[in-house]
Amino acid sequence: MRVPHIIAAVLLCCSFVFGQDCMMGRNCVTGASPLHLAVYRGDMAEVKTLIRSGADIHAKDFYGFEPIHQAAAQGYTQMMVLLLAEGVGVNSVGPDGWTSLHFAAAAGHLSTVRFLVRRGANVYALTKDGDAPFDWALRNGHLGVATYLRKRDWRR
């Protein structure tokens, strides 16, 4: 199961069908903030504008996802640079214990995984089911990511 793709599909579908501004600037179905949606679309200019306007960089949608999790799932490394510079934690935990590194690894974004590890992402972080980022990379067939993470995990 490719969890990040499910997140992206839900955000995309709901943003088109229901609109993003129906409840205090949030999508009615997913609870995605305008910042979540701008990150999903890869709109760096809009993300910068929203942050300058005081958008909550730690906002969680109804499922517990933060904008940085969406950026990681999409492989938007430059957006992650911006969010981290604004104070988002590299090991910010989302639903079920997933970190940005879990999302990037599960989606196979090697450059994003490398960036996160260089920034101090915890390669040992476990989900509530006991899965490390390595496990999700391997499960989804991203052998380059799995190999990279395995070299950083002395326990394997």
Image (tube, grey):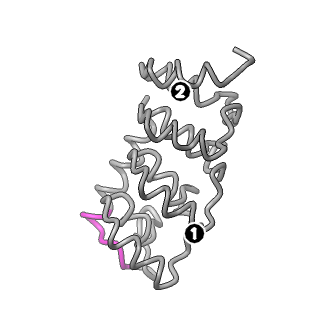
Q: Residue at x 40, y 45 (%)?
A: 75
Crowding at dot 1, Cα within 10 Å, few <14 / some 14-19 / many 20+, comes out as few
Residue 103 pos. (x, y %) = 50, 40
Report the residue that reaches farthest toward the front: 118
Q: Please say if 29 is above or below 116.
A: below
Question: What is the spatial separation of the Cα atoms under label 1 and label 2, in whole angstroms?
Answer: 28 Å
Crowding at dot 2, Cα within 10 Å, few <14 / some 14-19 / many 20+, comes out as many
Q: Mark 2 points at which residue?
A: 136
Q: Nearer the viewer, mark 1 or mark 2?
A: 1
Which amino acid, by three-letter code, is at mark 1? Answer: Glu
Dividing the image into 4 quarters, which one contains the N terminus? top left
On screen, residue 108 versus residue 122, left or right, reads: left
Q: How many numbered tags mark residues here?
A: 2
Start-end of magenta stretch: 15-22
Q: Name the residue under label 1.
A: 86
Q: Please say if 48 is above or below 42.
A: below
Residue 131 pos. (x, y %) = 64, 28
Work out whether residue 48 or residue 125 is closer to the camera in this orientation and state it.
Answer: 48
